[in-house]
Amino acid sequence: MDIKRHLKSALKQLGFDKPRKAQIIPMNTLDAEQDAIVIAATGSGKQVIYETVGLAHSDKLTIVIEPLLALIYNQVQTLQAHDIPADYIDMTRSKKDISKILNKVRKGKLNFLYVTPEQLQNHSFIETMQHSDIFMVVIDECHSITEWGYTFRDAYLHIGDFIGKLKHKPVICACSATISADSLNIIHDSLHMDKPAVLRSDLRRDNLILLKKDVTCNKKTLEERLEFRIKKLCKLIDKYHKDGSVLIFAQTTTYVDALYNILEEIYPGDVTRYHSRIKPERRKKQLLFDFLQGKRKIMIATSAFSMGIDVADIELVVHFNAPISMTDYIQQIGRAGRDGRKAHCVLFYDQNGDDDTVSDSFIKKVKKQSAKAAKTIKTKRKQVHDFIHSDNCMVSDILEYQGQHEVKTCKRYTACAQKRRNSK
């Protein structure tokens, strides 16, 4: 199967000679103005699918809804580098900036507009969009509808209402690598999609080497136990950090700041950080770009950095703390090895209960706002615990969670390697 000439031309403008096999059907489907849910592996080029189709219909606007500002900056920067009219609206833009952007939309001078779901509830934004020629609305990382919509970002549950207010129904594209089977109907209904094509491709990432590391320490104080964990972290960096980048995920902003202060002394000039509490926003943006542009090679971040960020050369991802959900974990390891080279992903866990103490505190805060949300988070955390203590192949467990049954083991994870040796 091939793609049409106008799609090929758009793809070339984005800097690609030809599409990957898994991109062809989604491109053709959206181009034919059929709604689609695209489920594809992290790093498989979902972004290229909707950017190509949106660019092929450059006489109209494509709105891209993203969960994270880091993701918005990353994608808009890439499009602008290819001289494609793209912009974004977020909390850092002044009223004057927003007015100029909406004016460009009215005049048909913008091809792509990136926003968070909260923006869709703004009256002047809605009014502008009702008088604009919109070809497509993209809900990138659409698992956020079920992951976050019922907890702390109910704006995700109202995207369909926004689409319903538009004068002409646009093409709707929802995409993610982590849509669980029971979420599909919720996403479909929530977005008011019209008989969407559900397009799945293989979710395996064979260039990722997944490892679990027990960092339980019998020292009495938390400070000593963290010191032990940091030594393990530095050993991993020294072992696997060659010419690429390193991404370290920590559970809280306090952990991120502490790790940054320590690692900046050990690897001076090479470390940056990213989390929601860094102020002002311009400073946070600069720290992000230092990593995206390769000026600093070691990034320490909370899950605010986890989705869709495209840094080609990440060769090591370390979870300093166990993540709070499997979706977070899959998205975060998905940042690694996007250049196709081998990359290591190491998950730290402990049996002292240190990580659980942090997540318990988070669940307690959430419970004050919503008992249902707290219960949901507890269920997700249990899934992570089961994954950590499973003797199965890590890859098989991850794919099973994503709805892809896999009998072939990765042969590299500790348990898999042991089984392979025993079978010889």
Image: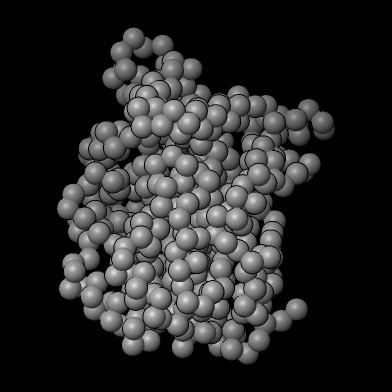
Residue 388 percent coordinates (x, y): 57, 28
- The percent coordinates of residue 259 (x first, y second) are 29, 36
Kindly tell me whether residue 135 is visible in this rendering: yes
Pick whichever, 407 or 269, lies toward us.
Answer: 407
The residue lying toward the viewer, choosing from 11 and 90, is: 90
- Image: 331 above or below 418: below
- Residue 307 visible in the snapshot: no
**Dividing the image into 4 quarters, which one contains the C terminus?**
top right
Q: Residue furthest right?
A: 424
Return the x and y of residue 156 as percentages of the image width and height: 45, 53
Q: Is residue 25 above or below residue 351?
A: below
Q: Nearer the viewer, residue 111 or 304?
A: 111
Colouring method of the image? one colour
* Image mark count: 0
State left or right for residue 220 relative to residue 180: left
Is residue 234 found left or right of 2 in the rendered image? left
Residue at image point 45% right, 82% down = 133
Q: Is residue 329 above or below residue 196?
A: above
The N terminus: image quadrant: bottom right
Left or right of 349? Residue 205 is: right
Q: Residue at 28% across / 19% down in the picture?
A: 223
Q: Position of residue 254 (x, y in %)?
A: 27, 33
The residue at the point 73 percent across, 40 percent down is 409
Q: Residue at x 51, y 36 (%)?
A: 325
Quarter of the image where one finds residue 261: top left
